């Protein structure tokens, strides 16, 4: 399957130095048609809290889903970062990532050497803006109309591939990101919804008493 984040390597738009605190809901969709004629689709959603120096993301799980915990004595506990809260922090110009297991009250620190195992590229810019803001300015403005005041489409096509971004200048966040090929064999779309109001009870301020773990603690 084509990488859902193909757009991140090529999109570009100018972003001002300061950005807005936001609560977001992010819906991901991808579709691939294989040479054998098989269509594969995937959908999932995340919630995200964006504050100065902090990005907190959680997967929206279905009501019937339940975390599996190895509660038997001596059982090896497996680390599934997808279902845990993801906390990206920027301090002193350095970016770090940790995952929070609310069930076992653990904070799991991830070293840079293991970023690839938790689908993190190490970029604060990508975590905070959901794309590469430093390169987004090279993406031409589109004539495609926008129904959102202050938001404009930018798009690029090259060798049969396309990338499009609906960028909200005021809130400094994309509202939609699309990528795919003109032949229709694959398409990716991300829809970002800004939620009304702001969460005041911030989850990273409620980790007192949590155990500090390392990623290596979960390796076989």
Image (cartoon, grey):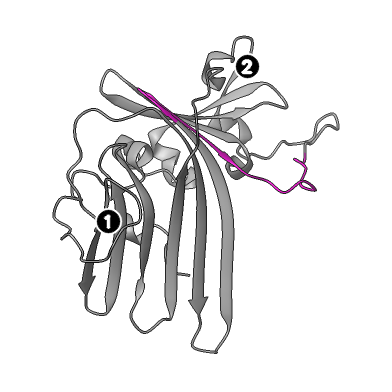
Residue 61 is covered by the magenta coloring: yes
Name the residue nearer the viewer: 40 or 72: 40
Asked if residue 110 shows in the view, the reply is no
The residue that mark 1 highlights is 9
The residue that mark 2 highlights is 211
Name the residue nearer the viewer: 61 or 151: 151
Q: Secondary structure at mark 1?
A: helix
Tell me what residue is drawn at x 60 percent, y 10 percent.
208
Image depth: mark 2 or mark 1 in front: 1
Percent x, y of residue 70:
79, 36
Residue 19 is covered by the magenta coloring: no
Q: Secondary structure at mark 2?
A: strand
Which residue in the rendered view is the most extreme toward the top?
Answer: 208
Give the class, few, some or many, for how many residues have Cα within 10 Å of label 2's Cα (few <14, many ≥20).
few
Q: Which of disc 1 and disc 2 is earlier in sequence?
A: 1
Percent x, y of residue 137:
15, 50
Q: CA distance from mark 2 to mark 1?
A: 36 Å
Tell me what residue is drawn at x 52 percent, y 53 percent.
27
Tell me what residue is drawn at x 27 percent, y 56 percent.
9
What segment is highlighted magenta in the picture? 50-68
Task: Give the vertical position of 188 relative to 197 (above or below).
Answer: below
Give the class, few, some or many, for how many residues have Cα within 10 Å of label 1's Cα (few <14, many ≥20).
few
Disc number for residue 58: none
Tell me what residue is drawn at x 58 percent, y 84 percent.
38
Asked if residue 193 shows in the view, the reply is yes
| Residue 53 relative to residue 201: left or right | left
Task: Give the vertical position of 169 relative to 29 (above or below).
Answer: above
Percent x, y of residue 48:
49, 36
Name the residue nearer the viewer: 99 or 11: 11
Quadrant location, the C terminus? top right
| Residue 13 relative to residue 207: left or right | left
């Amino acid at each position: 399957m084509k990488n859902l984040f193909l757009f991140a390597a090529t999109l570009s738009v100018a972003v001002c130095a300061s950005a807005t605190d936001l609560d977001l809901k992010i819906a991901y969709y991808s579709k691939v048609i294989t040479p054998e004629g098989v269509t594969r689709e995937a959908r999932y959603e995340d919630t995200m809290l964006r504050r100065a120096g902090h990005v907190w993301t959680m997967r929206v799980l279905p009501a019937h889903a339940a975390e599996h915990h190895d509660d038997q004595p001596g059982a090896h506990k497996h680390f599934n970062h997808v279902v845990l809260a993801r906390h990206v922090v920027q301090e002193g110009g350095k970016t770090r990532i940790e995952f929070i297991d609310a069930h076992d009250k653990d904070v799991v620190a991830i070293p840079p050497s293991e970023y690839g195992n938790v689908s993190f590229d190490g970029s604060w810019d990508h975590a905070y803006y959901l794309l590469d803001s430093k390169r987004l300015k090279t993406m031409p403005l589109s004539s495609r109309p926008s129904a959102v005041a202050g938001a404009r489409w930018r798009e690029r096509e090259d060798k049969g591939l396309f990338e499009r971004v609906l960028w909200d200048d005021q809130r400094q966040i994309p509202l939609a990101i699309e990528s795919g090929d003109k032949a229709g064999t694959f398409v990716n779309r991300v829809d970002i919804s800004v939620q009304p109001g702001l969460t005041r009870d911030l989850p990273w301020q409620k980790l007192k008493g949590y155990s500090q773990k390392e990623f290596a603690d979960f390796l076989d």
